[in-house]
Image: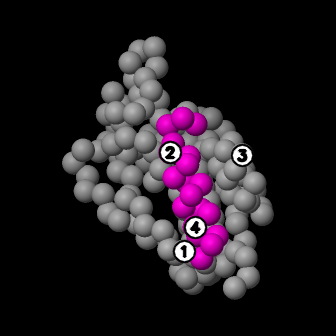
């Protein structure tokens, strides 16, 4: 088997990563593209740091279990199937599903810190940074959080 093409996609929260990836995947078969999201590697709330006001800040590189993230990407590159519990954004009422990532000719690694983590960045063949204006990102985050997530941040 040829080595997969590894694409890293990053940008600020609300920059359009999810929408971009959906559009990018559209013309391909599911077996041709594997998407690994940094979101599935958040540490539990109990391990998250709080800011000066006592609020958990998940937008820090230390909020991610980067060792597990790297290990799973390396397993995919080695042709192994990866299983990982879905991250439920610390919503205690959500029942996490088991996510299954299968090796594919194209592996997309996405998240806020994909370029920041040196060992993950070194695995990337192509890097895409999505830029959006701050006011647009805020509007998108508010809409997303109202629709998909519990907004309790303490």
Proximity of marks 1 and 4: CB atoms separated by less than 8 Å: yes
Q: Residue at x 41, y 15 (%)?
A: 53
Mark 1 neighbour class, 10 Å CA radius: few under 14, some 14 to 19, many 20 or more:
some
Q: CA distance from mark 1 to mark 4?
A: 5 Å
Query: Residue 106's quadrant in the figure?
Result: bottom right
Number of the front mark, 4 or 3: 4
Proximity of marks 4 and 3: CB atoms separated by less than 8 Å: no
Proximity of marks 1 and 3: CB atoms separated by less than 8 Å: no
The image position of residue 71, as x and y in percent, is 56, 58
Q: CA distance from mark 4 to mark 3?
A: 17 Å
Secondary structure, mark 4, is helix
Q: In the image, which residues are magenta?
A: 61-79
Mark 2 lies on residue: 65
Mark 4 neighbour class, 10 Å CA radius: few under 14, some 14 to 19, many 20 or more:
some
The image position of residue 4, as x and y in percent, is 70, 75
Q: Which of disc 2 and disc 3 is earlier in sequence?
A: 2
Q: Residue at x 43, y 42 (%)?
A: 43
Q: Which of disc 4 and disc 1 is earlier in sequence?
A: 4
Secondary structure, mark 2, is loop
Mark 1 lies on residue: 80
Q: Mark number for residue 75?
A: 4
Q: Which of disc 2 and disc 1 is earlier in sequence?
A: 2
Q: Residue at x 77, y 61 (%)?
A: 126
Q: CA distance from mark 2 to mark 4?
A: 16 Å
The image position of residue 114, as x and y in percent, is 65, 49
């Amino acid at each position: 088997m040829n080595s997969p093409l590894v694409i890293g996609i990053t940008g600020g929260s609300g920059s359009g990563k999810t929408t971009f990836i959906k559009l990018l995947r559209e013309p391909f078969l599911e077996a041709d593209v594997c998407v690994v999201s940094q979101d599935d590697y958040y540490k539990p709330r109990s391990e998250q740091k709080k800011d000066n006001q006592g609020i958990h800040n998940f937008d820090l590189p230390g909020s991610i279990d980067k060792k597990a993230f790297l290990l799973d990407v390396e397993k995919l590159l080695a042709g192994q199937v990866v299983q990982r519990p879905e991250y439920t954004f610390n919503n205690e009422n959500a029942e996490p599903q088991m996510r299954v990532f299968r090796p594919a000719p194209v592996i997309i690694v996405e998240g806020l810190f994909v370029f920041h983590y040196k060992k993950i960045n070194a695995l990337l063949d192509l890097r895409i940074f999505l830029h959006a204006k701050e006011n647009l990102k805020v509007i998108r985050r508010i809409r997303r959080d109202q629709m998909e997530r519990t907004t309790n941040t303490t």
